[in-house]
Amino acid sequence: MPGKACVIGAGPNGLAAAIVLAQAGLHVEVLEAQAQPGGAARTMDLTLPGFKHDFGSAVYPLGAGSPFFSSLPLNGHGLEWIHSPAALAHPLDDGTAVMLERSLDQTSASLGIDGKAWTQLMQPFVKHWKEFAPQILGPVSFLPRNPLLMAHFGMLALQSAHSLARRFRDQRTRALFAGLAAHSFLSLDEPLSAAFGILLAVPAHAVGWPIPRGGAQSITNALCGVLATFSSKVSVSSPVQNLAVLKNNDLTLCDLTPRQLLKVGEQSLSDSYKRQLASYRYGAAVFKVDYALNAPIPWKAAECSRAATVHLGGSFEQIAESEKAVRSGQHPDRPFVLLAQPSLFDSSRAPAGKYIAWAYCHVPNGSRVDMLQKLEDQIERFAPGFRDCILARRVFSPADLESMDANLVGGDIGGGLMDLRNFLFRPTRRHYATSAPDVYICSSSTPPGGGVHGMCGYHAAKMALTRLKRN
């Protein structure tokens, strides 16, 4: 299929879309506004020389489990996944930690009286991961390929985390599930919050929660390497101000959220479609800090050093209170903190004998409140002496994040609120299509939503190619 295509944005979804188009034989150019490709999947010197920090995402359960990424020779272009011994640690105030092990059996055994309930909840999806992953990482479908499996998931996913957690009798298990569900940025008493708890636990057992050697940039570089084999290129420092300048292309795919698409598509999109984009709702934001450290984090629970990812928030009730506050536009005194410590498992990330850490907490969209002390107080709660390890830090407010990646609107790292309406009609009923027949949207504001998996770009490109063939 001869023709020309342009992709705006060199994040994982934009690069995935570009690869699909190039595989179909189109000549593809990718235009990236920033000087470095990757969007939120970039690795940068954010503190001191030699300390390699991930600007956005850091740990990749859905990257390792992505059906599209798995189909590409990314390892041949330098991508190497590193698995920490445990996927996740969740420390508690008694000085112990509840662990999400890579093995479902080991996790269930460690959960004691809740082991059987954990297995019953997760095993159907772990066992059928290769069938399950393409369906949960695809467009919303009312005719799933495995209707029984998806009907079972649907009945669970539509629940709130609060409701689903009633299956567990031990507060430790409930705390573990709360931390997983809090990735939804929803209040834990809202529908769909349970889905995130399941969708993060299942890949931990099926494919792991790996980090890429060298940082997030390794994923971007590998995708760029695959794209280059089709003689397609990524042009950096090339912002697009108006879609009209790209009218000579057969297809234009936009790795942009609705707000950016409105700006560049003012002359190309219908008034009714623009009104729909303008009503799109963004979710809560993050307040993020990157650390250069002179020692490993001194966890009270030694088990925390077995995991690249640590959830800090205490009990189910404490995490639920924090997330409810954020959804109400408030700033919690004890925020739920997500922390990554990749240099424990990848020595290339810091100078010899030094370490890095990456941490964020949830805040209302567009927040201007300095959460540094509260965030670090939560780390100190479970790792006394943490502040003594800090050589340097780089603080990112929501506005700072958006200034470095325009898709992070108001500090929203998920491409939009993930409530039921946005889940079904993301960003509109058209999903990837727009009112212009040659323009598509392929960002995390389309199904299946946020996360580094490339599936938004994959599905958008597949739809665009199907419609192009019809014309």
Image (cartoon, rainbow, N blue to C red):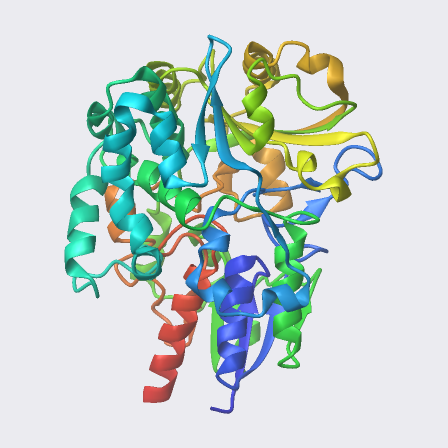
Q: Is residue 181 visible?
A: no
Q: Quadrant of residue 446?
A: bottom left
Please identify the residue farthest to the bottom as the structure is shown.
2
**Is 438 placed left or right of 238 in the picture?**
left
Q: Position of residue 459 (x, y in %)?
A: 38, 67
Q: Residue at x 54, y 14 (%)?
A: 378
- Against 446, residue 182 (above or below) is above
- Against 80, residue 49 (above or below) is above
Q: Position of residue 131 (x, y in %)?
A: 30, 61
Q: Position of residue 263 (x, y in %)?
A: 50, 56
Q: Is residue 372 visible?
A: yes
Please identify the quadrant where the C terminus is shown: bottom left
- Against 163, residue 443 (above or below) is below
Q: Quadrant of residue 44?
A: top right
**Is 145 placed left or right of 129 in the picture?**
left
**Is 5 placed left or right of 108 in the picture?**
right
Which of 274/16 is in front?
A: 16
